[in-house]
Amino acid sequence: MSNNALIPQSKLPALGTTIFTQMSALAQQHNAINLSQGFPDFDGPRYLQERLAFHVAQGANQYAPMTGVQALREAIADKTAELYGHKPDVNTDITVTAGATEALYAAITALVRQGDEVICFDPSYDSYAPAVELSGGVLKRIALQPPHFRVDWQQFVAQLSDRTRLVILNTPHNPSATVWRKADFAALWQAIADREIYVLSDEVYEHICFAEQGHASVLAHPQLRERAVAVSSFGKTYHMTGWKVGYCVAPAAISAELRKVHQYLTFSVNTPAQLALADMLRAEPEHYRQLPEFYRARRDVLVNALSNSKLEILPCEGTYFLLADYSAVSDLDDVSFCQWLTKEVGVAAIPLSVFCADPFPHKLIRLCFAKQESTLLAAAERLCKL
Ligand code: PMP
Ligand code: GLN
């Protein structure tokens, strides 16, 4: 290294490479069946791919409007009205982002100031904490307990302070596969109604919900939605995580602030993909309406194939993840167990403790069932030998 080279003092010194990247790399290295990182091993709808090619060929290849193409925002507004009984304003309330990840980052950056407290629920998705930290916020992580991972609302109220600015929730929940009930949103509203607290609701698995009562969205709660950002991802809905297109819905005043961040983070999202997604939403609404059944079938294939294994399967109400307790198989901690499983058994999974700040002594791993039946059966055959 020359004398001119500089090593920056890290703004995120504790942060390494994400567990998803680590486990997928280990799976590849050992030729293991990869049920770790969440992505399908099958393709998205043919019509969507054809519309992308069509719009590229038509020359829709220049910058999209900063907030997203009009046709897509209109289709999102109509879908939201149909599903949650609330039609967001097409011009002021909907922002198309580079995946849900960008929406989450923009919302957190827009809302959290130096010293503000942010509440989230552990196990929590890994992108929240670094965004809060970069904004100078202080994360208060409430630990949820298996197998039901339900919020204790008294414990929640006890965490509130005059500095609380934002609550981040995720339903259907990655990695626990549990979902919030309407009653949870009612309890949340009761707790924060008299305070200036915003809500960031990560609903990327909104269409992958098996619960009898269906997906409860923050957008269906008339009071909460006036101070909430709801985040969605087309990557999950259309089996194409690599397209990285998502969006968020928030009232005009909140959207205006998060758009200031979005404007200089990415400015806008790729045009032909947005046009193709608008066509898809209009032409084939059955795709998202049938998604719960589509994934329920895959979940059941994996659950049934593991029924003779020593793994104890936890209830799965949503997402494309299944939790398995391996207490009867090994004494290893979950990170070591996942490494061993990948290298020696040929199945890659995700340990749960990495999503938690407090020690998480449970022996739980996350298996992704967004896979072809043959992949799931091959993985289960190996897991049944444990
Ligand atoms: N939130 C959760 C809970 C997720 O599981 C994911 C992706 N797996 C994201 C956000 C990010 O979504 P995207 O790929 O659209 O950025
Ligand atoms: N969200 C995906 C998961 O939970 C992974 C996304 C990523 O790799 N960043 O597996």
Image: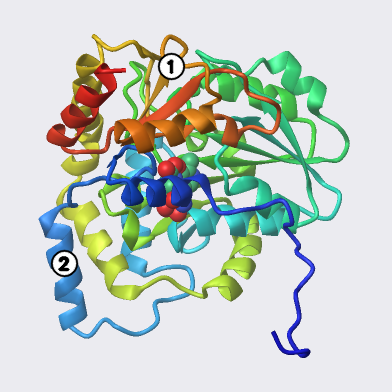
Q: Is residue 320 visible?
A: no
Identify the image quadrant of residue 362: top right
Contact flag, marks 1 and 2 (Cβ < 8 Å): no
Helix, strand or loop under label 1: loop
Foreground pick, 302 / 157: 302
What is the residue that sits farthest to the front in this orientation? Answer: 344
Q: Position of residue 7 (x, y in %)?
A: 75, 75
Tell me the kind of residue under disc 1: Tyr
- Reading the image, the residue beneath label 2 is 51
Residue at the spot x=51%, y=55% of the render?
A: 101
Residue situated in front as seen by the camera: 371 or 318? 371
- At which x and y percent is residue 377? 17, 27
Ligand 2 under 8 Å from disc 1 Cβ: no
Distance from label 1 to label 2 (Cα)? 44 Å
Is 131 placed left or right of 21 in the picture? right
Q: What residue sits right under mark 1 in the picture?
A: 326
Note whether 291 is above or below 67 in the view shown.
above
Question: In the image, residue 268 lies at what x, y percent?
Answer: 46, 73
Q: Quadrant of residue 258?
A: bottom right
Q: Residues within 10 Å of mark 1 (few under 14, many from 20)?
A: many
Q: Earlier in the sequence, mark 1 or mark 2?
A: 2
Q: Quadrant of residue 201?
A: top right
Q: Nearer the viewer, mark 1 or mark 2?
A: 1
Front residue of 263 and 139: 139
Count of numbered tags: 2
> Which label is found at residue 149?
none
Q: Secondary structure at mark 2?
A: helix
Amino acid on which disc 2 is placed: Arg
Beta carbon at label 2 within 8 Å of ligand 1: no
Q: Is residue 48 above or below residue 119?
A: below
Q: Is residue 334 left or right of residue 361?
A: left
The reply, left or right, for residue 154 in relation to residue 74 is: right
